[in-house]
Image: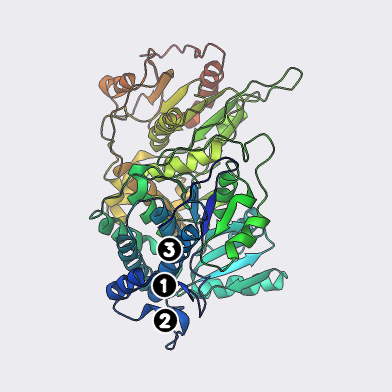
Amino acid sequence: MSRTRATGGPAPAVLFPGQGSQRRGMGAGLFDRFPALTSLATDVLGYDLPRLCLEDPDGRLDDTRYTQPALYVVNALSYLASLEDGEPEGAYLLGHSLGEYNALLAAGAYDFETGLKLVIKRGELMAGAGHGGMLAVVGMPESDLARFLADEGLRGLDIANLNTPAQTVLSGPVEDIARAEGLLEDRRVRTSRLRVSAAFHSRYMEPARAEFRAFLQGFRFAPLRATVIANVTARPYTDGGIARLLSDQISGPVRWVDSVRLLLRHTSPASCREAGGSGVLTRMLGQIAPPPAGTGGAAARPVAPGTAEAPAAHRPPAAGVPVTRPRLFCVAYAGGDERAYAGLAEQCPDVEVVTLERPGRGRRMSEPLLRDTDGIVDDLLRQLRDRLDAPYALYGHSLGARLAFLLCRRLRAERLPAPRHLIVSGECGPALPSRERDTWRLPTDAFWDHLKQLGGLPAELFDHQDLMAFYERILRADFEALGSYTHRTEPPLDVPVTVLTGHDEWFTEQDIGAWQQETTRPLTAHRLPGDHFFIRDHWAEIARIAVGALRADGAADPLPSAV
């Protein structure tokens, strides 16, 4: 089989469509051209695949159990046909939802038969979810749509697909989809039901995600020979992250806009081709603006396959250009949202305090919750990676402390500008197991009793059972992430670390001192009056530390209560 590699010019990219692009007659001319692979697929599936695709006599092509394998095979044969016809292999590969399996196949992660078996299992699990639907919303930006869901009390719906700046897809129970459709119609917003049988890419697929993750443990994936951009993170796959990202994709959103914008940093729209022949992704590509000038383009340095994206150079501002205020990026504790550090922001008038909000709360209430630290850190990095043009520090409390630490490691791994300082509170050194690692497993009554002991929750919350039920889901997801944390030994950070704890907390000096092994700099530690949520009584002191940490020398102001 003849395969051509591009020589010079923008890097070639291939896009693979997903469910929704199926149509009767797809694959015409391909099955006869590749009889061996067609016969293999038919044997594995146990039914006549060409007849399903070309004729669909029983109307099964829209049943996800049949749709996903059919599209996978047609996409794969279409790509092989393009190679035989002299098109270059894709240096960058991007698949929409199901199409991501074809992108990984093209990058050499597995062979044709293995990919088909993965897709069969995925289709079975997703079809088993049932009683759900998806609704495309056209002409309403994501932020406005999220506000609409909150205002209308549509908490059962998640934002599942961010397809173009003007097209977003909702996912959830059919009754909520129908209500949203009617309300949006009243506002003269155009909508369209998708041809799916379940609430894909939403919290309702969490059981399917967990089962698929267990299924993937039986597979080993080969190193990638091209760059594949993941839907759920809009970042390149790494060789060790394939199983996690494939399973997370089932319940996570398809960040297509961000994925395409990353792609266009490294190539041009003219160098992108679509497999399968539907043209749907090509049309989307034309609706997604390329990244602003100066962030890359066709001449940008390519990303090495199987690695995280290499950053652009960090340049100081030109003479005469106003310098951006220093920033303090904050990571919330379990259950916290963007308001978690409002008191701290009030004490830092000369610092831009930015709370990195996780999905499933606040402005991102409609997005599915994340339950593992790797996925959360991917999301946090996506929020701040384009805002590192000024001096900055990181701060996190409790769960937020571990996440801020992991974020520092990720910044180092991607060779992005390092923070001036890492400030953590309410948590022991990350090499030690968290005392709260099993909290998420507690029965409901014991769970709430434990949280009352920790403090930090408003007393009025316990007067409203519906609110308790709503926040329990968020809190359990956060504590599950803490429970799933496994510490990986890596070289210490070359970043100063300051640790804050409350006098009435349970941490020993050894617990606090464990932070020292994570930094090459001398550790600074302070105890302040109060329990686990002592921070709320000491925003002024914490602000003083943060401002000091953002100085050129990175030195924090001393406090008389230093250990």
The residue tagged with tag 3: helix, strand or loop? helix
Instruction: Report the Cα–Cα distance between label 2 and label 1.
Output: 8 Å
Horizontal relation, residue 136 to residue 470: left or right: right
Which of disc 1 and disc 3 is earlier in sequence?
A: 1
Residue displayed at 56% across by 32% down: 343
- Locate residue 548, reporting x and y percent: 54, 15
Residues at discs 2 and 3 in contact (Cβ within 8 Å): no
- Locate residue 561, reporting x and y percent: 41, 14
- Locate residue 400, reporting x and y percent: 42, 36
The residue tagged with tag 2: helix, strand or loop? helix
Picture layout, residue 279 above or below residue 473: below
Residues at discs 2 and 1 in contact (Cβ within 8 Å): yes
Residue position marked by numbered label 2 in the rendering: 52
Give the label on residue 70, or none. 1
Residue displayed at 30% across by 71% down: 40
Residue displayed at 63% across by 75% down: 182
Q: Residues within 10 Å of mark 1 (few under 14, many from 20)?
A: many
Q: Quadrant of the C terminus?
A: top left
The residue tagged with tag 1: helix, strand or loop? helix
- The kind of residue tagged 2 is Leu
- The kind of residue tagged 3 is Ala
Residue position marked by numbered label 3 in the rendering: 76
Instruction: Report the Cα–Cα distance between label 3 and label 1.
Output: 10 Å
> Which of the pair 435/261 is nearer the observer?
261
Give the label on residue 200, or none. none
Which of disc 1 and disc 2 is earlier in sequence?
A: 2
> Which of the pair 64/150 is nearer the observer?
64
Q: Quadrant of the N terminus?
A: bottom left
Instruction: Report the Cα–Cα distance between label 2 and label 3.
Output: 17 Å
- The kind of residue tagged 1 is Ala
